[in-house]
Amino acid sequence: MKRNRRISAVAALALAALVTGTGAGFAATTTPSAAPVATHAFDTAPATATAPTRSFHGALPAPTGPYAAGEDVIHLTDASRLDPWVPSSGPRQLAVTMVYPAVPGTGTPAPYMTLAEAAGILQRQNLPASSGVTPQSLSSVTTHAFDGARPQRGKYPLVVLSPAHEDPRITLTSLATDLASHGYVVALVGDTYEDSGETLANGQTPPCAICDDPTLIDSIPTSRARDVSFLIDQLTHGNTAWRLAHLIDKHEIGMAGHSIGGAAAAATMIADPRVRAGVNMDGKFFPAPMPGQINRPFLMLGEADGGGGDTTWGQAWAALGGYKKWLTVAGADHFSFSDLDLLHEQAGFPTPPFSPERGVEITREYVTAFFDQTLKGIHRPLLDGPSPNNPEVLFQP
């Protein structure tokens, strides 16, 4: 199965695999706990007597909309339930990056991730210093988002973003900043214990507790749906969870996800009618929705080969009852729909034939057009059929 697959041995050599945490490097072999990962890198990296042979300076593409992208990181605790993966850690905790329409020229540049989160990635992958990728360089990737930026006046639809299995939330940053620049409030949800580490309110960055147990994968979309419903509650019931919650139009909420995050988008729509539109970016459905479960707008955006034998997209397409689009991107791979291929290229690793820059551009353009049409009521001809400007994008079936 290509969608939601474990990365091949070849891909494990690349930054894409480094960030997804699915390679053969660092993996927890002890009983999962709430203990944080070390905040200094290379605890498990091979010793080297030579200086790094190259340096890594990553940069995401600038947002394309009229607004700047402001950023806040908030921390939430769901006192109503224990963490589903490590109950001994107590109530479910989430780190969420809020990205919002901001006034240009305000705020300070936001880091891509914390140093501890970057160290967790490098530790899990046992990445040598000779790669040139360090916690400092990884955390300082240019995001074009600004901490504490002054918000634009008004109310904006909320879009929740959910990453792939084992991927930190930051891997959808380029999409988040672009959506914010076009007038959306975006919530990037960190899935505690599901990736190489999300820094929590107490400063701890716990490692993945479930990355090496494939039997738990089918449970992830339902668990994330609970996380998202809790997040929506916190953001729309009063203004206590986030200082800028007044920016959110609570009647216009969408969700998009990459890989298993796309399955989580569908699961959330089934469980929570407040989510009015959903996007699955190259993810197998766990499980495929049944007829009548999703009668609201839904976009399926993925690889052109049908996901290497994945039959759930055909099942989902037949079951979807509302406005729907199924788009495939010729030449794209699984990570064309996140930041990963682009960072892989910038780190000097071999890249797929399909341009990582085009992958980011297409993902941004079509996801934004979809939410413009379904949440803002703005007709986007881009969704009507093939475009000469985007010959790679094919409309199915």
Image (cartoon, rainbow, N blue to C red):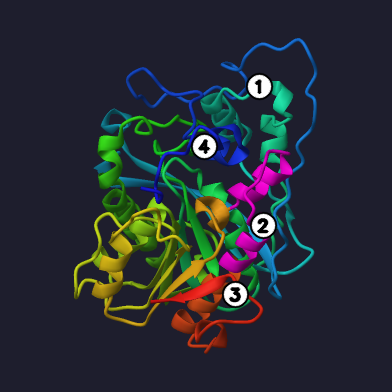
> What residue is shown at x 46% (from left), y 35% (from top)?
22
Q: In the rendered structure, which amino acid carries the disc numbered 4? A: Thr
* Residue 279 image position (x, y, % from top left): 42, 67
Q: List x then y, in percent, for residue 221.
A: 31, 52
Q: Which residues are magenta?
A: 339-363
From the viewer's perspective, is the residue at label 2 or at label 1 nearer?
2
Q: Residues within 10 Å of mark 1 (few under 14, many from 20)?
A: some
Identify the residue at image location x=26%, y=46%.
218
Is residue 247 shown to the viewer in this render? Answer: no
- Residue at horizontal 61%, vertical 36%? 14
Q: What residue is shown with label 2? A: 355
Q: Which mark is residue 183?
A: 3
Q: Is 329 included in the stretch rendered in magenta?
A: no
Name the foreground residue: 121 vs 23: 23
Q: Nearer the viewer, residue 367 or 162?
A: 367
Report the mark closest to the observer, 2 or 3: 2
Compared with 128, 93 (above or below) is: below
* Circle 2: residue type: Ser
Going by the numbered disc 1, the residue's amino acid type is Pro
Marks 1 and 3, the one that precedes in the sequence? 1
346 in the magenta segment: yes
